[in-house]
Amino acid sequence: MNNKLSEVRMNQEVSQKQLATLLNVSQKTISSWEIGRTNPKPAQMQHLEDIFDIPKEEIFFTAFNYKNELNDKEVV
């Protein structure tokens, strides 16, 4: 899964360790999410949305968002 978690986290100046503490997971788990090796559970995605005040779809479903942007820019 391609995601923007790392970008969002760094833009809001939150370390992996701080985020891991907030979510009660390991720093290694955060790293795995950021590189797309594993994915957070739906409840964790919701918690990330609440922490960063950004819709989880913007963080985790960038491929979907990109496809929608292309559809919006189609020339008639």
Image: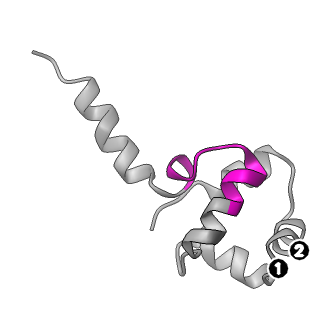
Q: Residue furthest top?
A: 76
Q: Which residue is mark 2?
A: 21
Image location (x, y in percent) of residue 61: 45, 55
Image location (x, y in percent) of residue 15: 86, 62
Q: Residue 52: say if magenta.
A: yes
State yes or no: discs 1 and 2 in contact (Cβ < 8 Å): yes
Q: Residue at x 37, y 52 (%)?
A: 63
Q: Amino acid at mark 2?
A: Thr
Q: Which residue is mark 1?
A: 24
Cα–Cα gap, marks 1 and 2: 5 Å
- The one nearer the camera, 56 or 18, is 56
Image location (x, y in percent) of residue 57: 50, 50
Q: Residue furthest left?
A: 76
Q: Amino acid at mark 1?
A: Asn
The quadrant where residue 47 appears? bottom right
Span highlighted in magenta in the image: 47-59
Image location (x, y in percent) of residue 2: 47, 62
Q: Quadrant of the C terminus?
A: top left
**Residues packed near mark 1 inside 10 Å, few (<14), some (14 to 19) or many (20 plus):** few
* Secondary structure at numbered mark 1: loop
Does residue 8 appear left or right of residue 3 in this picture? right
Q: Residue at x 55, y 70 (%)?
A: 42
The quadrant where residue 29 appears? bottom right
Q: Residue at x 54, y 76 (%)?
A: 39
Q: Main secondary structure of the magenta part?
A: helix
Q: Quadrant of the N terminus?
A: bottom left
Q: From the viewer's perspective, is residue 54 above or below residue 29?
A: above
Q: Residue 66: say if magenta.
A: no
* Secondary structure at numbered mark 2: helix
